[in-house]
Amino acid sequence: MKKYNVAIVGATGMVGHSLVQVLQERNFPIGHLKLLASIRSVDTEIEVMGQTYKVEEARPEAFDGVDIAFFSAGEAVSLTLGPEAVRRGAVVVDNSNAFRMSEGIPLVVPEVNPEMLASHQGIIANPNCSTIQLVVALQPLQTTAALKRVVVASYQAVSGAGKEAVDELMDQARAVLDGTTTMPLIRFPHANAKVQHQMAFNMVPQIDVFVEDGYSKEEMKIIHETRKIMGLPNLKITSTTVRVPVVNGHSEVVNVEFDQHVSVEQIREVLRESPGIVVMDDPAELLYPMPAMLSGRDEVFVGRIRVDHSVPFGINMWVVSDNIRKGAATNSIQIAETLIARGQL
């Protein structure tokens, strides 16, 4: 089997660690591995497949000889080093927002639109974590009937904001439980916000900065990315994103209106037969997806499937997935695996 030289940019972050883990679990055909990060992480040691690697500085020369580079170090790093990696012969799979809506750059979820990989010019964008699980659940539904309108509310774990956000949640929770008067207030709703909110035992209805019409940037990502991935530029879709005091695993309430009648049993059946989806939907047994029970899994889980009686052809469902794995690391590696399977890498 052919082996590939792999680089992970942002190797010391949460997604970087997950990329290392998933590459090992899936027996990705690695020839040589480079773990890259900022200069402050240089010489940090990470064990991969029984071998200890030292983290190197992410700089243009580091991509010499690299076949595929997984980027998870933020938009600025991707914009600077992504094109440099491509110039040196690497294919870049980027986890930031740098290229997602760029013309000519495919935005890919392998279960949904793998055919878009054929048009890549060196950079492939990995979608927003909340978008990935949404489109994996939506794609099979449009094979039964046309989607008329989609309304999604996401309840997003703090791991989506990084390890520091998880640490802050824990510190806040301890402060509340200990009854102390002070607690760290740094990263919610986001770093550098003019007002900071308590996350522990609370919910914050804002992820990222606000943009036009009172929507947040995260909400607009879901809207625009869903349309691009599914090839439905005129899809009527709206979203609300909420940060919740859950460590890992995003959850979504998804309301779908079709152009014709589709039964709940049809929905369950088509979802059961679809790749990457697990239907977990048995109200009699109180069985439905929950983030605490599904952290560490790669599938998208769907439950609470039921009729929306407020419109002629509507259904509601509850969608849960591990945002660090399927929402970032696993989807990125699946993109690379698909490239290999198609002879494009």
Image: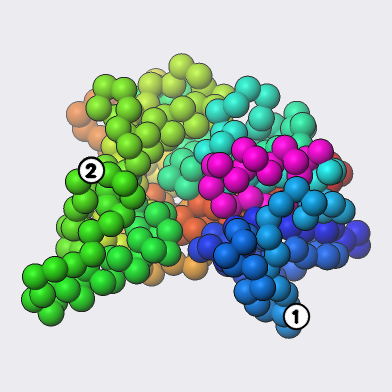
Quick one: 255 or 2, which is closer to the camera?
A: 2
Of the pair 127 and 181, the residue shown nearer to us: 181
Q: Which mark is residue 194?
A: 2
Q: Among all residues in the image, which is located at the extreme top?
A: 234
Looking at the rendering, the stretch of residues picked out in magenta corresponds to 69-87
Query: Would you place residue 269 above or below residue 40 in this image?
Result: above
Gap in Å between the C-alphas at discs 1 and 2?
45 Å
Residue at 9%, 70% in the rendered image: 181
Horizontal placement of 93 versus 280: left or right?
Answer: right
- Tag on residue 296? none
Q: Which residue bears the numbered disc 1?
A: 51
The numbered mark, 1 or 2, whose residue comes first in the sequence reads 1
Specify the principal SS of the magenta part: helix
Residue 156 visible in the picture:
yes
Q: Closest to the observer: 102 or 130?
A: 102
Q: Mark 2: which amino acid?
A: Lys
